[in-house]
Image (cartoon, rainbow, N blue to C red):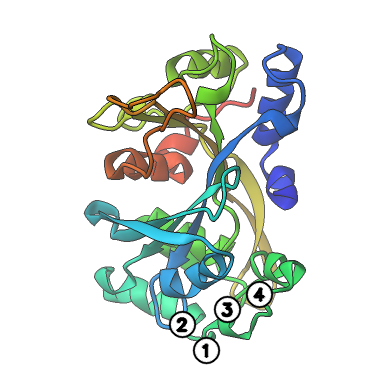
């Protein structure tokens, strides 16, 4: 989270706005609904590899999701105890891309000869943290990045960022009235100049109306690439973003006043549009708050 905050100034800016407006007393009052990771679905990597970290710490694999248009699979994982964030891991179905895109991706991922999680000491949290922020393959060339960008913006994001945290999520339903719905919270964010993902609408709701989500548009960042001639070249690419979730209380509970049960899991249609927070159709709309 420290490095995520450093690369995504929206995180600090949103928290600062909440504190200054008296919505929360301090950052610790924010409940993190979930964090998300993107992966390449290739041998030795993908969901099957990365999930080992969270399963080791007591997370449980739950529902599967598919995103045919974006060629993605995903699972979510429930935490071992209350107060910890859910985990959402997606992977690109690399085999469904064009031959050229597969060739580019494998020119990097084939450097990984064995599952890197298997060599981690999972009892050492610092080793795990470092793993999630280190390179798994050589620095991409700008030419390869742009070729992938033309076919799969998800692929381009992962080839550069690897396991870097894609987003964290503020649970808005636990905020005070006036801020505890996505509609109200979106209004608050836009009044402070934040640009929201409008793919499919700024408010993304499950068919049952019990899971409502929104997100900022990813911030652009300067990235260094291999120029293909032994040098380096800088290029501005999409970074990470912040998501917001409202989980409503389930109907027909026997005793909803004491620890009401809220909608769990995720919704494929919502997530499909939220993925686009890093896509150029959204980042091209971004203005700085």
Question: Seen in the image, is 125 located left or right of residue 260?
Answer: right
Label 2, on which residue? 44
View extreme (front): residue = 254
Foreground label between 4 and 2: 4
Label 1, on which residue? 114
Q: Establish if 103 lies above or below 240.
A: below
Q: Establish if 59 lies above or below 173.
A: below
Label 4, on which residue? 122
Q: Nearer the viewer, residue 65 or 280?
A: 65
Q: Earlier in the sequence, mark 4 or mark 3?
A: 3
Q: Position of residue 19 (x, y in %)?
A: 74, 19
Marks 1/3: CA distance? 9 Å
Q: Earlier in the sequence, mark 3 or mark 2?
A: 2
Quarter where residue 255 is shown: top left
Q: Establish if 65 lies above or below 212.
A: below
Marks 1/2: CA distance? 6 Å
Q: Position of residue 9 (x, y in %)?
A: 70, 36
Foreground label between 3 and 2: 3
Quarter where residue 178 is shown: top right
Q: Nearer the viewer, residue 27 or 61?
A: 61
Marks 4/2: CA distance? 17 Å
Label 3, on which residue? 117
Q: Are marks 1 and 2 in contact (CB under 8 Å)?
A: yes
The quarter in which the C terminus is drawn is top right
Marks 4/1: CA distance? 17 Å
Marks 4/3: CA distance? 8 Å
Query: Do we see residue 149 in this rendering?
Result: no
């Amino acid at each position: 989270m420290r490095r995520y905050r450093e690369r995504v100034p929206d995180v600090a800016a949103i928290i600062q706005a909440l504190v200054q407006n008296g919505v929360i007393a301090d950052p610790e009052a924010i409940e993190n609904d979930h964090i998300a990771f993107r992966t390449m679905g290739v041998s030795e990597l993908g969901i099957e590899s990365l999930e080992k970290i969270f399963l080791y710490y007591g997370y449980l694999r739950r529902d599967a999701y598919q995103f045919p248009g974006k060629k993605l699979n995903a699972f979510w994982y429930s935490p071992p105890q209350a107060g910890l964030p859910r985990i959402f891991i997606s992977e690109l179905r690399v085999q469904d891309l064009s031959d050229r895109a597969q060739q580019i991706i494998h020119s990097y991922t084939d450097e990984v000869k064995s599952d890197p999680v298997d060599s981690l000491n999972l009892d050492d949290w610092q080793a795990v943290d470092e793993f999630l922020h280190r390179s798994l393959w050589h620095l991409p060339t700008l030419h390869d990045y742009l070729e992938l960008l033309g076919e799969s913006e998800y692929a381009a994001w992962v080839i550069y960022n690897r396991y870097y945290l894609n987003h964290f999520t503020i649970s808005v339903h636990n905020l005070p009235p006036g801020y505890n719905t996505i509609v109200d919270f979106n209004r608050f964010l836009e009044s402070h100049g934040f640009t929201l993902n409008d793919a499919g609408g700024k408010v993304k709701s499950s068919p049952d109306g019990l899971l409502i989500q929104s997100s900022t548009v990813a911030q652009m960042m300067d990235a260094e690439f291999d120029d293909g001639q032994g040098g380096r070249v800088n290029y501005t690419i999409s970074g990470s973003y912040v998501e917001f979730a409202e989980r409503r209380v389930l109907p027909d509970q026997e005793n909803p006043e004491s620890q009401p049960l809220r909608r769990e899991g995720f919704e494929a249609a919502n997530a499909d549009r939220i993925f686009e927070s890093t896509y150029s159709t959204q980042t091209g709309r971004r203005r700085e708050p």
